[in-house]
Structures are given as C-alpha cells and as structure tokens.
Image (cartoon, rainbow, N blue to C red):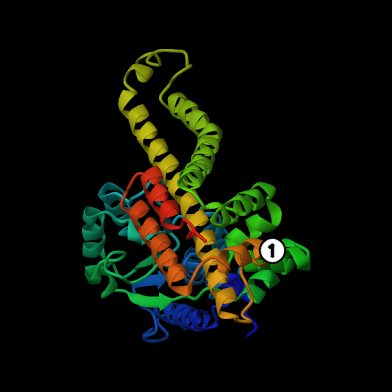
C-alpha cells in the first residue's frame, strides 16, 4: 500500500492508516460544515506493543487534523505539529514514573480554549498508562464533557484495566497497532535514514520491530555494546555468584545511563531556572529573587530525580526485552523451527543454552522475565527484581 503525506511515518500499519485517513477527512467535513463527520470522534486510544509507533500515529493524526489538506506534510500546520510548536496541540510526556493530576488539570484547562487556528485543540498523552488515579479521574471528566473543538489522543501499551481504566477506555475509539515486520523497519532505515542495507536488516531483526531502537542499534556503537553484554548473560548463569553479578551489571548499566543524562541536563536546567528567577542580575529587586527560589528549585530537583528513575527503568526494560527475544530464539532452536531468529548473531550462546534446558524450563524463564518487568513497574527496587530474575534463570546443573 503506497502512503503519502503524514501517515507515511507509520510503518507497517495499513489498517490504522485507513482508519485515520477516513477520520481526518470526516474531521474536515465537520470544520467545513460539508458533512456529518461520523468517522470522527473526540477521544482516541492508540494501543500496541513498544515500537509499534503509538505516539508517531497520534502525532501524525494531529497533523492531519490541523492541516487544511488532511495531512500534506509540508504546510506550516504540519511542520509546527511535528516540531512541537503548534499553539493548539498540547503533548503530555511523563518525565517521571507517572503523570500527576496537576499536569492533567492544567492541560485540560488549556485545551478548553477556542483553538487559535480555528480548527481543533488537541491533547496528546503519551504513556497514558502512567496516569495516577487522580489524573485519570480528571481526564475522565474532560472526556465525558468535551468541548466541541477538543480532541484527546491517548497512547498506551494495552487496553488492560491495569493500563487504562475501563471508564476512560469505554469513551475512546480504540485503534490497535501491530509490531511492524522487520522488512518494513529495514526499508525505513534505508530510505529515510540512509543506513546501508546489511546494517538496516540486522538492526531491524535485532530490535524486534521497534523502529527507534533499530535506528539506535544501526548508528550507536554504545547501544550495540549494551545489547551484546545483555545477550551474553544467559549462558553465564551457571552459579549463584554469576547470577548476582549479572544483576549488578544490568542495574549498573542502567544507572550509568541515568547519570549520563543527568550530567547532560541537570546543571543547565538549574542554571536556566536561577537566571529566570533573577540570579546573577543587577538592579533593584534582583537580590530578592534567589532567596525566594527554594520552592522552584526543590520542584526542579524532584522532576530531575523522577526523570533519572524513569531513564533507569526504561534501560532495564530494554534489557529485559532483549532477554525475552533471546529465550524466544532458544525455544525456536529447541523446537527445530525455521522461523528467523531475532538474535542470529548470538547463535553460539543460543545453542549453548538450548542444549542445557527443556522447553518447560524456557517457558518458566519467559514467565520470570514478565514477572520482573511487572515488579519494576510496581516500584520494586531494581537490584531486588533483577537478582530474583537472574537466579531464576540459572541454568540447570548438567
């Protein structure tokens, strides 16, 4: 299927493109007064696994709604939505582990204004599964009583009640997205990013359909090294000492990621805040500003700490996704399947583990990884969650 305009950003999502194209056309009918616009609704929930492009789809849809040509990809509206400067498109991205009720109340208040461009006020909430209970209730009220010109675009991994409340889900049109096939991901890397064919196809398979991760693996040597270190772990889990060491290594790498981001962002953010409060200025009144800045500085430090925690958890989750792919490959080898392996470049380690375990053991191992991801989501200390996982993945004695 040949796709042009803003929806060309969606990789391997033909069905979703059809739905969104029809909805954006219906939205144009509503604006122009030329039709009933029955294919358009005021609240959408984009669901799909990591890498399926939930937020990409939401932003592309926002471009199509604001564009007078239904998402040409070239006009001022399409450009400003894409770069995040459109006055009528508001994006909520959690910096920490959750989205607070204060953030949602403020964004709902702003979204109730009449759109400056005369079309739509659009709220995009990435990671809507991170809404606190209070935030979810505040959002529910806005979705239940929407302004005629307001559209809510929510993104979440699944429609499970633990991710998105049933009351919110029932008031949204759910649009499921799928994991893009490796060939489609490779084509994007080649055509859009200029990556050579061999590297693009390797990265697409290794990233298991995640477009952003595939690009990092194809272009970032550190990302390649981190992946290689994670995939070397299963064959090493032959003793309790090795298991605990592996857990420490995984957590240490995630902490290093968080520290690197903190080194890059924290000090400039603090300096910018202090300057905005008058620090370093001269003249009447400038001396009082820094003395009254304790609350603002404390709030910034809270956000920075929450961001560091999220970066650490996201790094650990990437590692667990790689481990899931590894054990899936071991299961395929064990079954003698001819399905392509995600981590074929680690065939030796895969064969080594396959020779030491049973299919039942592999299924329990995959369950253990799922349990570890859930533990991290419920704020179990990373070292405790990872130590429990690696000891559970210890290879049976031969």
Q: In which image quadrant can residue 234 be found?
A: bottom right
Q: Quadrant of the N terminus?
A: bottom right
Q: In which image quadrant can residue 90 be found?
A: bottom left
Across and down, in percent, residue 174 comes to: 36, 76
Q: Is residue 99 left or right of residue 322?
A: left
In the image, residue 390 above or below residue 349: above
Across and down, in percent, residue 254 comes to: 50, 44
Q: Is residue 154 left or right of residue 242?
A: left
Q: Is residue 347 left or right of residue 58?
A: right
**Does residue 49 appear in the picture of this structure?**
yes
Across and down, in percent, residue 29 comes to: 43, 82
Q: In which image quadrant can residue 12 be found?
A: bottom right
Number of numbered discs on residues = 1
In the image, residue 286 above or below residue 18: above
Q: For the residue labelled by badge 1, is the local secondary structure a helix, a strand or a loop?
A: helix
Front residue of 179 and 32: 179
Residue shown at 30%/27% (left/top)?
295
Q: Residues within 10 Å of mark 1 (few under 14, many from 20)?
A: few
Q: Is residue 27 left or right of residue 345?
A: left
Residue shown at 32%/48% (left/top)?
379
Residue shown at 34%/68% (left/top)?
149
Across and down, in percent, residue 183 comes to: 66, 76
Question: Mark 1 — residue?
Answer: 345
For this orientation, the residue located farthest to the front is: 398
Front residue of 376 and 100: 376
In the image, residue 231 above or below residue 44: above
Front residue of 195 and 86: 195
Front residue of 70 and 231: 231
**Does residue 92 appear in the picture of this structure?**
no
């Amino acid at each position: 299927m040949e796709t042009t305009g803003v929806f060309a950003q969606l990789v391997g999502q033909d069905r979703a493109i059809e739905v969104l194209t029809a909805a954006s056309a219906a939205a144009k009918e509503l604006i122009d007064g030329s039709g009933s616009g029955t294919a358009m609704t005021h609240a959408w929930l984009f669901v799909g696994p990591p890498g399926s492009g939930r937020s990409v789809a939401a932003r592309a849809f926002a471009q199509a709604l604001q564009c007078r040509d239904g998402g040409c990809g070239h006009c001022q509206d399409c450009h400003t939505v894409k770069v995040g400067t459109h006055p009528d498109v508001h994006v909520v991205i959690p910096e920490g582990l959750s989205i607070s009720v204060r953030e949602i109340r403020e964004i709902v208040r702003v979204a109730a204004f009449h759109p400056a461009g005369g079309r739509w006020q659009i709220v995009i909430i990435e990671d809507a599964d991170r809404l606190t209970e209070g935030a979810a209730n505040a959002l529910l009220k806005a979705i239940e009583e929407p302004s005629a010109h307001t559209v809510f675009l929510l993104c979440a991994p699944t429609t499970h009640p633990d991710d998105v409340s049933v009351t919110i889900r029932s008031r949204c049109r759910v649009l499921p997205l799928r994991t893009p096939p490796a060939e489609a991901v490779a084509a994007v890397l080649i055509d859009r990013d200029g990556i050579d064919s061999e590297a693009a196809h390797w990265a697409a398979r290794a990233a298991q359909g995640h477009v952003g991760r595939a690009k990092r693996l194809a272009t970032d040597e550190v990302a390649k090294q981190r992946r290689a270190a994670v995939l070397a772990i299963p064959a090493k889990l032959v003793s309790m000492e090795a298991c605990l060491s592996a857990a420490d290594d995984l957590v240490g790498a995630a902490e290093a990621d968080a520290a690197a981001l903190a080194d890059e962002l924290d000090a400039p953010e603090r300096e910018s805040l202090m300057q905005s409060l008058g620090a370093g200025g001269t003249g009447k009144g400038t001396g009082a500003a820094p003395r009254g800045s304790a609350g603002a500085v404390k709030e910034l430090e809270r956000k920075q700490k929450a961001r560091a925690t999220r970066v650490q958890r996201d790094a650990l989750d990437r590692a667990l996704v790689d481990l899931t792919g590894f054990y899936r490959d071991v299961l395929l080898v064990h079954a003698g399947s001819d399905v392509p392996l995600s981590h074929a470049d680690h065939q030796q380690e895969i064969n080594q583990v396959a020779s030491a375990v049973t299919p039942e053991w592999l299924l329990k191992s995959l369950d253990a990884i799922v349990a570890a991801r859930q533990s991290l989501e419920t704020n179990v200390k990373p070292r405790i969650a990872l130590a429990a996982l690696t000891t559970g993945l210890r290879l049976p004695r031969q």
